[in-house]
Image: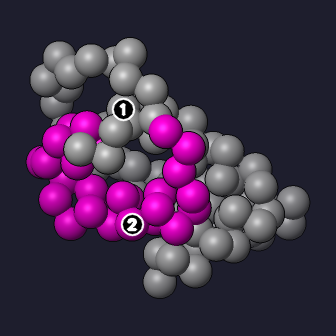
Amino acid sequence: MNHTLKSLMVATSVAFLSPVFLVACTGGDAAVEAAPMSPKAAAALAKKIQANPSGADKILKDAGTSREAFEALMYEIAQDPTASREYAAAMK
């Protein structure tokens, strides 16, 4: 993968996931597994979290995922050049 694209994806992931990790854990079910999510759907979810960081847990739960699963998805997207491009385009 292009180093610049990888750096962009990591920076984007950090920027959009930071609110998720800064919100205090409310004891939610960490065992909740995410359904497969497209890069576009992941970007839409990241935008919702960015707009309402204090509601991150509810946003993730309503989407059928967990913090851990969403973080893992972000890493998967960052490792796939096609998915990275789709995610970056959806984040604009």
The residue sitting at 32% across, 46% down in the picture is 63
Q: Nearer the viewer, residue 15 or 77?
A: 77
Is residue 41 in the magenta section? yes
The quadrant the N terminus occupies is bottom right
| Corner quadrant of residue 32 | top left
Q: Is residue 73 above or below residue 83?
A: above
Please provide percent x and percent y for residue 69.
Answer: 48, 33
Which residue is disc 1 drawn over? 66
Q: Residue at x 56, y 36 (%)?
A: 72
Please report contact status of discs 1 and 2: CB closer than 8 Å, yes or no.
no
Residue 24 circle label: none
Q: Is residue 37 left or right of residue 78?
A: left
**How is the rendered protein coloured?**
one colour
79 on left or right of 45: right
* Neighbours of disc 1 within 10 Å: few (<14), some (14-19), many (20+): many
- Can residue 27 be found in the magenta stretch? no
Instruction: Give SS at disc 2.
Output: helix
Q: Residues within 10 Å of mark 2 (few under 14, many from 20)?
A: some
- Which quadrant of the structure image shows residue 84? bottom right
Mark 1 element type? loop
State the residue at coordinates (86%, 66%): 2
x, y percent for residue 77: 66, 53
Give the amino acid type for the residue marked by disc 1 in the picture. Ser
Q: Which residue is mark 2?
A: 44
What main secondary structure does the magenta stretch of the protein show? Answer: helix
Amino acid type, mark 2:
Ala
Region rendered in magenta: 35-61
Residue 64 spot, x, y in % from top left: 34, 39
Q: Earlier in the sequence, mark 1 or mark 2?
A: 2
